[in-house]
Amino acid sequence: MAKKRSRARRQPSCPAIGALLRYRTRTVRVIAEARGQRAMIESLDTAGRMFVRTVKWGSQRELGAQLF
């Protein structure tokens, strides 16, 4: 029986400070690097208030071709 190939995983890397990324459905900005492969991001909530959150590098995605 042939052995199935596993998908190559993308190694998460620390995003540059000030970079714009996608986190879940939000566009966020990286403000600092934290411990344990995490980065501090800031974004706006639905009321327009700015908040800071710590998330893992692997949870963040590139924006792609469009900003919004």
Image: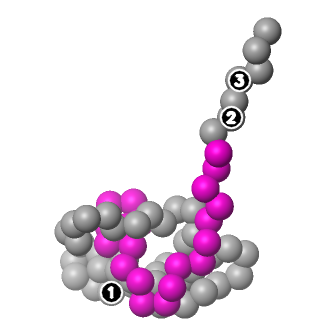
- Any magenta on residue 14? yes
Q: Which residue is mark 3?
A: 4
Marks 2 and 1, how far apart in space? Answer: 40 Å
Q: Residue furthest front?
A: 2
Q: Nearer the viewer, mark 1 or mark 3?
A: 3
Q: Residue at x 42, y 90 (%)?
A: 18
Q: For mark 2, what is the residue?
A: 6
Q: Are marks 1 and 3 in contact (CB under 8 Å)?
A: no
Q: Position of residue 50 (x, y in %)?
A: 33, 86
x 22%, y 66%: residue: 66
Mark 1 lies on residue = 50
Q: Position of residue 49 (x, y in %)?
A: 28, 85
Which amino acid is tagged 3? Lys
Are the two marked residues, 2 and 1, in contact with CB atoms closer than 8 angstroms? no
First in sequence: mark 2 vs mark 1: 2
Question: For the residues carrying marks 2 and 1, which lies nearer the camera in this image?
Answer: 2
Magenta-colored segment: predominant secondary structure: loop
- State the SS at label 1: strand
Q: Residue at x 64, y 50 (%)?
A: 9
**How far across and how far down the image is residue 27, in percent?**
32, 72
Q: Is residue 28 above or below residue 16?
A: above
Picture coordinates of residue 4 (x, y %)?
71, 23
**Quadrant occupied by the C terminus:** bottom left
Query: What residue type is disc 1 on?
Result: Met
Asked whether 67 or 5 is in front, the reply is: 5
User: Along the line of sight, which residue is nearer the eye, 12 or 4?
Assistant: 4
- CB atoms at circles 2 and 3 under 8 Å apart? yes
